Structures are given as structure tokens and as C-alpha cells.
Amino acid sequence: MSFSAWVMANEAVIRVTFFSLVFALVGIWELRSPSRELHFSKRARWLNNLSLVVLNTLILRLLFPAAAVGVALYSESRDWGLLRLLPVADWLLILLAVVILDFVIWLQHVMV
């Protein structure tokens, strides 16, 4: 089975795993070194945030099934993209893509 086929077959598990790991790491970080005083209970805030994540995920799953992976496979089949031009190992390309995407999401939070 090719890597692309494996990703398509396991896309939901991959997303949930990465989300859970990042959420747990950020939660532990927040518990160990909070950056400011809380105005609402941490439990209520986390419950609200997780509820939004679940709602957003359900809506996206209904409206755009496998959209991100579908666009990625479509782009790959046409040799689109900047990262494919770099002559480095696949694992480094994946790491670089995650860092760039995370940076863009961070920019969205900072700019708004």
C-alpha cells in the first residue's frame, strides 16, 4: 500500500491523534505555567473549547468529506506544490509542512 493510500485510509485517526497529542501537551503546559490569571474556571473554558472543536469537526465532516486530503492528493497527482521541489527526505518535508501550517495558524491568531 502506498503512503498516499495509507493516509487516505487512516486520515481520521491521524487527525484525531495529532489533535489529542497537541491538546494534551498544551493543556499540561498551561497547567504547569499559566501565563495569566483566570477569569473563568479552567474546566468550563476547556469544555467550551472542546465543544466547539466537536461541533466544527461534525460540520466540516458533513460539508467537506476528506477535503484536505482530497486536495492534497489532487495537487500531488499534478505535481503542484513548493515543498516537492526540495531535495530532502519525506520525513523532513512532513515536519516542515507541519511547522509552516502551524506558523500560519499562529499568524491568524496574532493578526486578528
Image: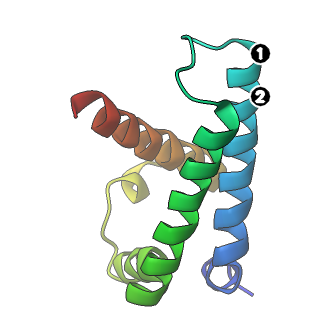
Q: CA distance from mark 2 to mark 1?
A: 6 Å
**Viewer-proximal residue among 23 and 90:** 23
At label 1, which amino acid type do we have?
Arg
Q: Is residue 32 left or right of residue 56?
A: right
Q: Is residue 25 above or below residue 34?
A: below
Rendering coords of residue 65 (x, y %) = 47, 87
Residue at 40% in and 84% down: 64
Rendering coords of residue 112 (x, y %) = 22, 34
Q: Is residue 68 left or right of residue 53?
A: left
Label 1: how many Cα within 10 Å (few below 14, some 14–19, many 20+): few
Q: What residue does disc 1 label?
A: 32
Q: Is residue 4 left or right of residue 84?
A: right
- Secondary structure under the numbered disc 1 in the rendered image: helix
Residue at 44% in and 79% down: 59
The answer to whether mark 2 and mark 1 are in CB contact below 8 A is yes
Q: What residue does disc 2 label?
A: 28
Rendering coords of residue 4 (x, y %) = 60, 79
**Viewer-proximal residue among 61 and 43:** 43
